């Protein structure tokens, strides 16, 4: 039997939060950490730029596609049990990533990492809601959002230190001791919370949503490679995208027919304006964050010529400022209301992107992007925490598991589409500048003069695109 909410709140909630943060920090860190190691990984594994894009997107695709189902897994098997199972899979897959020696092996291992992350992530919001009383959840969600935002954008910083000090493989090896420690902590301090009765899972819905999303993201990632035309025989990029949209349409119809039988997506969630707005904003914010991070990381290394460690340090100001602002913003939601924080936060967030884009010139110094990154970090802190708080504020306990899965799914879809869109843009600009074939195949040697001009343009266009 699971622990009910009053019993769960007898645990030290901040200790529980620390364990949960350790687990999901790794999962979000790994959405971006490979970007800083692109040159080293390409050289060691013989990877093309297309392979490199899949190193990131295989993880994010599986992560996003399975979040809906994993939210229900927590309802069925218990949030703690599901969290620890996902953490174990993620930790083991991280170890495998550190030992691979071909691009195909890396892509497969990253997909398994994404599976573990998807199973783990939705349970964190469920457990936070269970162990914190209502009057303290704003601050808790603020810390959760700060760590989530920090992890999403700190990948290059942490990765740069590891790549420069050790080797690119350590961006994965370091997950192992942290994962083991988090597993032990989860078993000792995290309560076994159950949010729903045990019922059958909507496997047809999971298949439809996973297949639809996979086809759409595949089309976005591979579209530029095939000039948005034929892949082979009658199969084309437009056909793949159309089929993905059609499958998601079937998924929506299937969910409508299952509303009285525990669907993956209860439509009651969208009757909450707070949840609907937060989920939509979550997708937009992750789209913007990933859209900034990938081209900016490449710009710092391939255009400005910084090392991985130097590029990582150049990106520290944004996450650091966000970490300080987010808990305050999350706690202020209950006092001021979400709108009074979100509206100015979004303006600051967009201003930071625009300022970074304007200052990212081929002849700029590294200090030129710092002001934009600070403004960007303030904006992240102001919007990430309130969206997380508002997403579950009005949701009844029986729906917190699926609401957490839905909210995180929207965020990760934004991240996947952002990475795919920017990847397509980089490929387009590279082709437009006539980069030699040798450079096309070896992403670790991208810093010739023609590519530097094209990449600078791509960074600026990509940042404005977000």
Image (cartoon, grey):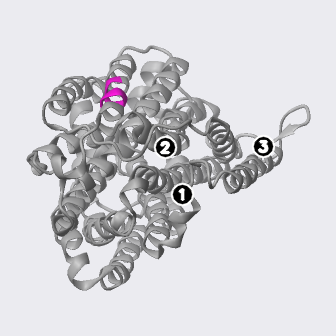
Drawn side of residue 435 relative to residue 314, left or right: right
Q: Earlier in the sequence, mark 2 or mark 3?
A: 2
Question: Horizontal and vertical percent for residue 16?
Answer: 15, 44
The image quarter containing residue 161 is top left
Query: Which residue is labeled 2 in the image?
Result: 67
Q: Looking at the image, which is closer to me, 37 or 175?
A: 175
The residue mark sitting in front, 2 or 3, is 2
Which residues fall within the magenta stretch?
A: 84-88
Question: Horizontal and vertical percent for residue 29?
Answer: 32, 42
Residue 240 is tagged as: 3
Tell me if mark 1 has few (under 14), some (14-19) or many (20+) residues whose alpha carbon lies within 10 angstroms of its own: many
Q: Secondary structure at mark 3?
A: helix
Query: The N terminus is located in which quarter?
Result: top left
Question: Horizontal and vertical percent for residue 434?
Answer: 66, 46
Query: How far is disc 2 from disc 1 in space, using C-alphas?
Result: 31 Å
Drawn side of residue 106 relative to residue 236, left or right: left
Query: Which residue is labeled 1 in the image?
Result: 458
Q: Secondary structure at mark 2?
A: helix
Query: How far is disc 3 from disc 1 in space, using C-alphas?
Result: 26 Å
């Amino acid at each position: 039997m699971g622990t009910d909410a009053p019993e769960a709140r007898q645990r030290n909630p901040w200790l529980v939060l620390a364990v949960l943060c350790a687990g999901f920090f790794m999962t979000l860190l790994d959405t971006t950490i490979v970007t800083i190691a692109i040159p080293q990984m390409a050289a060691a594994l013989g990877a093309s730029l297309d392979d490199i894009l899949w190193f990131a997107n295989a993880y994010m695709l599986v992560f996003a596609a399975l979040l809906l189902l994993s939210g229900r897994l927590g309802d069925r098997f218990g949030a703690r049990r599901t969290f620890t199972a996902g953490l174990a899979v993620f930790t083991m897959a991280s170890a495998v990533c550190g030992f691979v020696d071909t691009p195909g092996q890396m892509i497969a291992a990253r997909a398994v990492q994404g599976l573990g992350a998807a199973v783990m992530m939705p349970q964190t919001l469920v457990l936070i809601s269970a162990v914190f009383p209502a009057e303290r959840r704003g601050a808790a969600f603020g810390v959760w959002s700060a760590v989530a935002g920090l992890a999403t954008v700190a990948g290059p910083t942490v990765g740069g230190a590891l790549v420069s000090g050790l080797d690119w493989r350590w961006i994965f090896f370091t997950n192992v001791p942290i994962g083991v420690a988090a597993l032990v902590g989860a078993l000792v301090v995290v309560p076994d919370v159950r949010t729903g009765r045990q019922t059958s899972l909507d496997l047809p819905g999971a298949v439809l949503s996973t297949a639809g999303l996979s086809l759409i993201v595949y089309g976005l990632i591979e579209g530029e490679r095939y000039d948005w035309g034929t892949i082979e025989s009658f199969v084309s990029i437009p056909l793949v995208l159309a089929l993905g949209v059609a499958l998601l349409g079937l998924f929506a119809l299937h969910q409508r027919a299952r509303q009285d039988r525990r669907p993956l997506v209860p439509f009651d969630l969208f009757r909450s304006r707070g949840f609907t707005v937060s989920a939509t904003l979550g997708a937009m914010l992750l789209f913007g964050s990933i859209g900034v991070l990938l081209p900016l990381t490449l710009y710092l290394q391939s255009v400005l010529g910084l090392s991985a460690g130097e590029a990582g340090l150049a990106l520290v100001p944004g996450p650091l400022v966000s970490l300080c602002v987010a808990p305050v913003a999350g706690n202020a939601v209950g006092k001021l209301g979400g709108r009074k924080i979100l509206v100015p936060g979004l303006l600051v967030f967009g201003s930071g992107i625009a300022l970074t884009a304007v200052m990212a010139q081929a002849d700029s110094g590294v200090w030129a992007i710092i002001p934009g990154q600070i403004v960007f970090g303030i904006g992240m802190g102001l919007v990430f925490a309130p969206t997380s708080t508002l997403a579950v504020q009005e949701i009844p306990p029986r729906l917190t598991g699926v609401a957490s899965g839905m909210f995180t799914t929207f965020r990760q879809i934004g991240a996947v589409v952002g990475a795919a869109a920017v990847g397509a843009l980089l490929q387009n600009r590279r082709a437009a500048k006539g980069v030699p074939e040798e450079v096309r195949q070896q992403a670790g040697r991208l810093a010739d003069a023609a590519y530097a001009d094209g990449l600078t343009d791509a960074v600026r266009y990509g940042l404005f695109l977000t």
